[in-house]
C-alpha cells in the first residue's frame, strides 16, 4: 500500500517537472493552439474523474473525486474560452458574430 503510494507520488512529481520543462520551451505563439488541442485530453480526464467518483467508497475518496471532476471541468471550460478568444482575433472588424 505504502509502496504504491510512493510510486504514484514519484510519477506525479516527475510528470510535474517534465511538464513544466516542456511548456517552458514552447514559444508563446503556440500556447493557445496547444491549449485548444488539449481540450480532448481534458474531456477524457472529466470522464475518468466521473467514473472514479461513482466507484469510490470512503468519504475522503469521494471528496477527492469531486475535486478532480471540478478541476477537470474548469480546465475544459478554460480551454474553450481561450480557443474562442483566439478565434475572435482572426475575425474581421465588421464580422461580429
Image (spheres, rainbow, N blue to C red):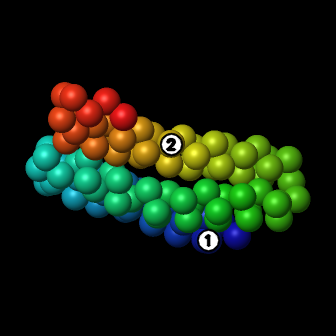
Residue for point 58% across, 46% down: 73
Mark 1 or mark 2, which is nearer the start of the sequence?
A: 1
Whether residue 94 sits left or right of residue 50 in the image: it is left
Describe residue 60's horizontal placement relative to residue 10 as left or right.
Answer: right
Compute the Cα span from label 2 to label 1: 32 Å
Which quadrant of the rendered structure holds the N terminus?
A: bottom right
**For residue 44, above or below residue 25:** below
Disc 1: which residue: 4
Q: Residue 77 carries which label?
A: 2
Q: Which mark is residue 78?
A: none
Q: Nearer the viewer, mark 2 or mark 1?
A: 2
Q: In which quarter of the image is residue 85?
A: top left
Residue 96, given in percent of the width and then of the height, sits at 31, 30
Image point (88%, 59%), residue name = 57
Instruction: Choose between 53 and 14: the one closer to the eye.
Output: 53
Res 58 → quadrant: bottom right
Residue positioned 50% across, 48% down in the render: 76
Amino acid at each position: 500500500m505504502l509502496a504504491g503510494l510512493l510510486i504514484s507520488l514519484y510519477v506525479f512529481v516527475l510528470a510535474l517537472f517534465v511538464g513544466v520543462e516542456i511548456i517552458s520551451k514552447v514559444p508563446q505563439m503556440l500556447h493557445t493552439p496547444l491549449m485548444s488541442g488539449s481540450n480532448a485530453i481534458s474531456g477524457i480526464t472529466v470522464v475518468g474523474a466521473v467514473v472514479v467518483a461513482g466507484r469510490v467508497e470512503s468519504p475522503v475518496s469521494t471528496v477527492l473525486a469531486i475535486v478532480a471532476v471540478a478541476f477537470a471541468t474548469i480546465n475544459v471550460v478554460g480551454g474553450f474560452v481561450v480557443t474562442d478568444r483566439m478565434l475572435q482575433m482572426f475575425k474581421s472588424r465588421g464580422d461580429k458574430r
